[in-house]
Every structure is written in structure tokens, then in C-alpha cells.
Image (cartoon, grey):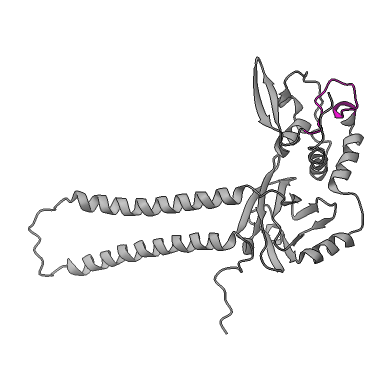
Amino acid sequence: MWNFPLLPEQASTVAPHVDLLYFFQVGVSLFFSVLIFATILYFTYHYREGSNIDRSRPIAQSLLLETTWMGIPFVFGMIMFFWGAALFYVDYEAPPGALDVSVVAKQWMWYIQHSQGRAEINELHVPLGQPVKLTMTSQDVIHSFYIPAFRVKQDVLPGRYTSLWFEPTKVGRYHLFCAEYCGTNHSAMGGWVEVMEPADYERWLAEGGTGPSMAQEGEKLFVQHHCAGCHRGSQTVHAPRLEGVFGKSVPIQEGKDVHFVTADVTYIRDSILRPKSQVVAGFEPLMPSFEGQISEPDLLRIIAYIKSIAGEETPQ
């Protein structure tokens, strides 16, 4: 009769932990709300006009009372802060071996491509019990990728990459929303996440055909945009080699100083679009910018290719 759930279904490993923190915060808020309003009502009645109360005594100050009413909320606040921070850090970094999925947002749709090559729009198919990491960017304005049943949400920004990860725990079909107002059709920018048994997921991938993977598509783009002429180990042009560079520390020259950055997806993106912003030590700032020449989906494919050669040794 009363089919009105207060919260979406818990369908990921992090969902119960988020809900527990949420209910703790609600409980603390209710406790202090009831305490404060009960005290107000008591004093309103006790010291009402005409009541037989001695009002001749001076106001007394109590250091213990003041310390108590500041100390107890402070303790509860710190519990919530450290609990939330611990949960954030657990949910921030995807575990090793997570399934890589690329997401490009645009008004008003989600373009999603799996590392194996299959793409879909406004739907995301994932296997049960497998951590999934989303690398996301926007082609226009700020969007926000939100799956209520998984208790995960992350802003999707133009000009940079953001990521989130989750591990589904229940087979089913779950709502996907954009949780950031992004224009007139914002309310229509939604979709579905389909959690499948691992065998069903593999069959679903196979149904898409035996086309190239994202890394294979990225290699073609790498050659097409003439990146291979400078950055492959077989070439003689004096440019940084990309074999084995992903995930490693790269020395960056700034004037006379050298500092190190990690060659992650953001670094690779910036090196393609703004190559003169971070010049590798020992090399001249000669690479042209590809800003406006390579689409967001193609950038993710090129990055997938560079990630795929991360285990290869850089030729000397």
C-alpha cells in the first residue's frame, strides 16, 4: 500500500556507508533541534508573564555550561568531518584493475565508450561485482554525473578530466541523471545504468561486433595527426618518447628550475592541447597545439592508446 521509499535502493559497495553517515547527520540534527526547541518551549512557559518566578536574582555565568554547549557540538562536528573525509578518500581512488569507461557530456546527452570499443548513448552497461572507473569531460558546459542508487556523483567539466568509480552489488537497471543545471533541456539529460552478470556483460560487448578497441582507434588517430612522426621510438626527431611514459614522473623545465609531474590523463591532454605549458626538460617547445582540431572523444581514444603502451620500454 505504502510503496514510497525514502531513499533509492542501495546498489553499490559505497551506498551503505554513505547512508550510514547521512542518517548519523540527520540524527544529530534532530537531537539538537528537539533539545533546543524543547528548551525554548520550557522557558517560554516557565517564565511567562504572570508566573510566580523570582526574577530578582542576577544572571549567573557558568564556564562549565558554556564549555559544554560549545564542546559537545564541536565533538559531533569533528566526528562527521573525519567520517566524511575518510569516506571521501576511500571513494576517491579507484582500485587496481578497475574497468575503464570514458564519458563525454554535451547538451543534452551522455556519450559513453568502453575500453573494448563499444559505445552507447545515455546508457551504461557494467558487470556485477567489478569496480568501474569513469574518466569524464564535457564538450560545452558543466554537467554532473549522478547515479542515486550507487550514491555517487561527480561534476563533469569542460577543459579537464574528472573521474569517479563504483562497484555494483545488485543486478538491475538504475537511473542516471545530470545533477547540474546545464540548459533548457537539463531535465531530459538522463539515462540508465544496466548492471549485468559478468557473462551477460561479455555477451553484450560481443554483440557490438569485433570492432577496434579505444586504444586501437587511438593509435590510428595518433598516426593520422602525425604524432607518430615525432613521438614513436622508431623515429629520429628529437621529441619525448611516449612508450612507457603513462603513470610515470616527467621532468618539466620552468626557466632554470626542473620539477616533476605525473603523466596522467590530465597531463597527456594538456600536452596535446597546450604543449608549451609544460615542456619536458631537455626538449624545445616546438610542438604545435591541437586545440580545436581534436574532439573530446578522440582525445580520450588517443589517451587510451598512450595508456596501452605504458608497459613498453622507451627506446634509447
* The stretch drawn in magenta includes residue 243: yes
Q: Is residue 79 above or below residue 42?
A: above
In front: 186, or 283? 283
In front: 67, or 282? 282
Task: Please name the residue shown 69% across and 24% down the image.
Answer: 251
For the question of whether residue 86 can be seen, the reply is yes
Task: Please name the residue shown 87% across and 36% down the image.
Answer: 222
**53 sits to left or right of 162:** left
**124 sits to left or right of 234:** left
How many marks overall?
A: 0
View extreme (bottom): residue: 1
For the question of whether residue 144 can be seen, the reply is no
Question: Residue 156, image x and y in percent?
Answer: 67, 48
Task: Please name the residue shown 71% across and 69% down the image.
Answer: 171
In front: 94, or 177? 94
Q: Quadrant of residue 30?
A: bottom left
Question: Residue 1, image x and y in percent?
Answer: 57, 85
Question: Residue 74, image x and y in percent?
Answer: 35, 50
**121 sits to left or right of 149:** right
Q: Is residue 32 above or below residue 215?
A: below
* The stretch drawn in magenta includes residue 96: no
Give the magenta-colored segment's residue range. Answer: 229-244
Q: Dividing the image into 4 quarters, which one contains the C terminus? A: top right
Task: Please name the residue shown 21% across and 70% down the image.
Answer: 45
Question: Residue 196, image x and y in percent?
Answer: 76, 66
Q: Main secondary structure of the magenta part?
A: loop
